[in-house]
Image (cartoon, rainbow, N blue to C red):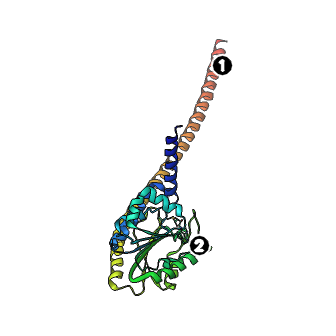
């Protein structure tokens, strides 16, 4: 194989690897779009400072770095190769030199290491792998770097069980009930709001706010998510009703089907009964007619003699 073909193959594999390491590679673009839309929907402007916890290969970062003014993007990612591959394949060294994003390889949720206050904090697909102590630490650290009006959005998997281990779980996942997540965040002195912002892989978005959040921030978050809730609630109701109708229809069909089967069974039984009667009748008529024949031929014989 020519060496440039080999090179292409290796490049393709490495491109898939840095994308696949952070989630389903076929949704790499979509996931980035979802987080970018959410934060701009919540009011992110180019002058704001954003902290991206566990920024990975810059799935969202590639959009934020371009959008924000120079020096306003901060990413924490323990695996430097993911940041490098993200920069080399999704952005360019030149662009990164111009935009001067800040990175750290910290792996202990030290959000205050940049000595900055942030307008927005993002943790996309981080609490879906984190332990309770890691989530609580993030909250304690977030409080240090949030202003009253800051908004911290994060995703996690809602489940019936609360993960009780201490370790980061990857590529598996951790789950928490909504009540447990709210409790952890409130006990660390912050407000937790569940949202219905969509997630392509079934995670739930929460907004974490300071207790001192001004009314307009609370209202903005409630307003946006309230609106979305309303929309989804209506769609949910419509789907439920449609489902109920289909289920009722199904039950009716099942009933009709079993009635038809019973009728078929009964008519089969009847036919068998009729057949047996007919057979009996024919054998009886056969024996009667053969007797008549015997009598007649006996008489004939006697008459001749
Ligand atoms: C599922 S990926 C999500 C990456 C990124 N947020 C995105 O949406 O594309 C989880 C990321 O968290 C990083 N990570 C693991 N331990 C971490 C820690 N202690 N602090 C911050 N990030 C961590 C992983 O290296 C990985 O890049």
Image side of residue 55 versus residue 215, left or right: right
Front in this rendered view, residue 29 or 58:
58
Camera-near label (2 vs 1) is 2
Which residue is identified by label 2? 163
Q: Quadrant of residue 146?
A: bottom left
Res 245 visible:
no
Which residue is identified by label 1? 298
Res 178 visible:
yes
**Which residue is at a point 59% across and 34% down the rendered structure image?**
279
**Callout 1 crowding tier (Cα within 10 Å): few <14, some 14–19, many ≥20:** few
- Give the image location of residue 167, x and y in percent: 61, 71
Residue 264 sits above or below residue 133 on the image: above
**Which residue is at a point 46% across and 72% down the rendered structure image?**
154
- Give the image location of residue 45, x and y in percent: 32, 72
Q: What is the secondary structure assignment of the residue under circle 1? A: helix
Residue 81 sits above or below residue 46 on the image: above
Quarter of the image for the C terminus: give it: top right
């Amino acid at each position: 194989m020519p060496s440039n073909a080999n090179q292409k193959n290796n490049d393709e594999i490495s491109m898939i690897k840095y994308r696949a390491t952070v989630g389903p590679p076929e949704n790499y673009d979509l996931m980035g779009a979802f987080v970018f839309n959410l934060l701009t929907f919540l009011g992110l402007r180019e002058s704001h400072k954003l902290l991206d916890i566990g920024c990975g290969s810059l799935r969202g970062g590639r959009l934020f770095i371009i959008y924000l003014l120079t020096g306003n993007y901060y990413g924490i990612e323990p695996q430097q190769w993911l940041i490098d591959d993200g920069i080399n394949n999704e952005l360019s060294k030149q662009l990164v030199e111009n935009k001067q994003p800040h990175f750290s390889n910290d792996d202990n949720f030290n959000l205050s290491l940049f000595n900055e206050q942030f307008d927005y904090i993002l943790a996309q697909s981080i609490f879906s792998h984190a332990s309770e102590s890691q989530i609580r630490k993030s909250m304690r650290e977030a409080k240090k770097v949030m202003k009253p009006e800051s908004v911290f959005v994060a995703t996690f998997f809602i489940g019936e069980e609360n993960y009780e281990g201490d370790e980061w779980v990857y590529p598996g996942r951790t789950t928490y009930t909504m009540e447990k997540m709210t409790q952890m965040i409130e006990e660390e002195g912050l407000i937790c709001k569940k949202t219905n912002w969509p997630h392509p892989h079934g995670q739930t978005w929460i907004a974490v706010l300071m207790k001192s959040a001004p009314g307009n921030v609370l209202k903005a978050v409630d307003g946006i998510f309230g609106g979305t809730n309303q929309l989804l609630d209506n769609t949910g109701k419509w789907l439920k009703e449609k489902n109920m109708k289909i289920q009722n229809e199904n039950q009716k069909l099942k009933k009709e089907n079993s009635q038809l089967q019973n009728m078929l069974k009964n008519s089969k039984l009847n036919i068998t009964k009729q057949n047996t009667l007919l057979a009996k009748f024919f054998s009886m008529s056969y024996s009667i007619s053969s007797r008549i024949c015997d009598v007649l031929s006996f008489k004939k014989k006697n008459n001749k003699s």
